[in-house]
Image: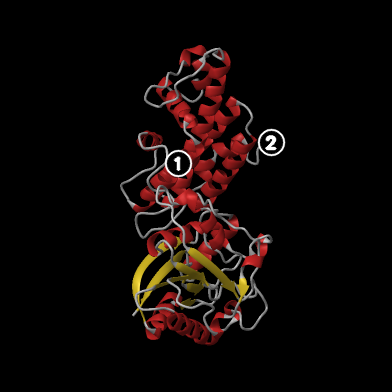
Amino acid sequence: MKEPFSEQQFAIIPTVVSGNQETVIVQFLTTAKELLKQAKTLEEIQEVWQKVNALEALSKKFRLSKEVQLDATELRIRIERRLGEFLSQKNNSREGNIKNQNHNLNSMKVDLDSYDSKSISSNIGFTKNDLSKFQQLASTPQKVFEAVVTDLRTEAAIKRQTTLSTTGILRAIRNEQKKDSKPLFSPIIKPSDNWNFSTVQYGRIDEKLEEYRGYIPGEIYANCFWYYVKPGDLVIAPMAGSGQILRVYEARQEWMGQHVYDFQLKMFDLTPHGKYKDLITQHDLTKGFPAENPDYIVMDIPYYGMVNQQYSDKPEDLANMALEDWKVAIGAIAKNCATAQKTGTLCTVISPNYRDVTKKQIFMVTDIIRSLWESAGYVLYDKAYSSRRIQQNQTPQMARINNQAKANQIMLTDITEILTFQKI
């Protein structure tokens, strides 16, 4: 297995990180992920575990960002799950004549003496209890494992005293296994106004991904539907883009849990594109609203200053407008929505603020949106937040941008606001 970083390079991490700790740790974590993909033997996976375990300790020692610490811990746990898979395969190959094994975590019998555990743990110091935990991780269904990791990582990111750990994940898995086979509520539906998803199930669907960077995880639409849409409602997506919202609606059996219901969804956009473009009606929202009496409107507007020329070269495209023209167009859209809706109905607008780090400019876009919708006859009804995940895959380029933001004393925009208004 060819390694991007050698054993010697990993050995000098404590010396290297004294310069730019976070960037170096992130680079080594990225390398470790690649090493894990390439690993074919138990010994190779053990070597990656050693490296990541060291990176995790260093990220805490140097008090790096919570996100980087969680990245290191999550990767270490995923490697332990991979180790457990190898151990289980070895055990099963020696006891292939045993049928109907009970894989329940509470009664799982692991014959750790059926192979030479000393050869597995001699260089790392795993105990039999450690090896048992790894196999328990491996025996957990993928969907359950991912849901538990997502929820516990989110909780750890929010609460300072909460940590992500192997023991905590196994405890949460046991709790999940005690529930009905079909969960009452999906982990995609968030119980608070923090709508963040470390594992995105409904990602991009555009055919040319490099051309369309302005998108949100489909999970945000799922939460909007859950909290703001009633059975039988008429829901209008006037900026449907590539039809992500339809994809999420069609998959509602997956995220509605035991409370599945139907509603009517219609899609429009100035420039339909992507997989569902033939199901999206072309319409300019600044000229009027495309349907009568919608119970709910939801729109992920083109982010001001971020997606210029990415959807079209049309001057009437919001993404291509200067700020004053953009304000006029958004104001017209707010009025058109208000004209179409009845009192008490809801309208959700999804947008981040905009900060130009190079020019040292800050644009409070969401405040502008709120002012325009309130002027049109709405009142702010609810608000939720979701990360744009720009720090998730930290590369050397991202590290340079972060340093520029710090140097210019202008923060990068990483939070999307989900603003929901009620017609009055």
Name the amino acid, label 1.
Thr
First along the sequence among labels 2 and 1? 2
Whether 199 is drawn above or below 311: the answer is: above
Query: Which mark is drawn over residue 382?
Result: none
> The C terminus appears in which quarter of the rendering?
bottom left
Q: Does 58 appear above or below 269?
A: above
The residue located at (49%, 73%) in the rendering is 355
Residue drawn at x 45%, y 39% is: 144
Question: For the N terminus, which image quadrant?
Answer: top right
Q: Is residue 320 left or right of residue 257?
A: right
In the visual, does 30 lie left or right of 151? Answer: right
Foreground residue, 24 or 201?
A: 201
Q: Residue furthest left?
A: 161
Q: Position of residue 313 (x, y in %)?
A: 68, 78
**Numbered mark located on residue 73 in the image:** 1
Q: Which mark is residue 2?
A: 2
Foreground residue among 3 and 218? 218
Which element is circle 1 on? helix
Left or right of residue 110, residue 271 in this image: right
Where is residue 96? Give x, y as percent.
56, 15
**Does residue 364 appear left or right of residue 120 in this picture?**
left
Residue 105 visible in the snapshot: yes
Q: Residues within 10 Å of mark 1 (few under 14, many from 20)?
A: many
Position of residue 248 relative to residue 371, above or below, is above
Circle 2 SS class:
loop
Q: Residues within 10 Å of mark 2 (few under 14, many from 20)?
A: few
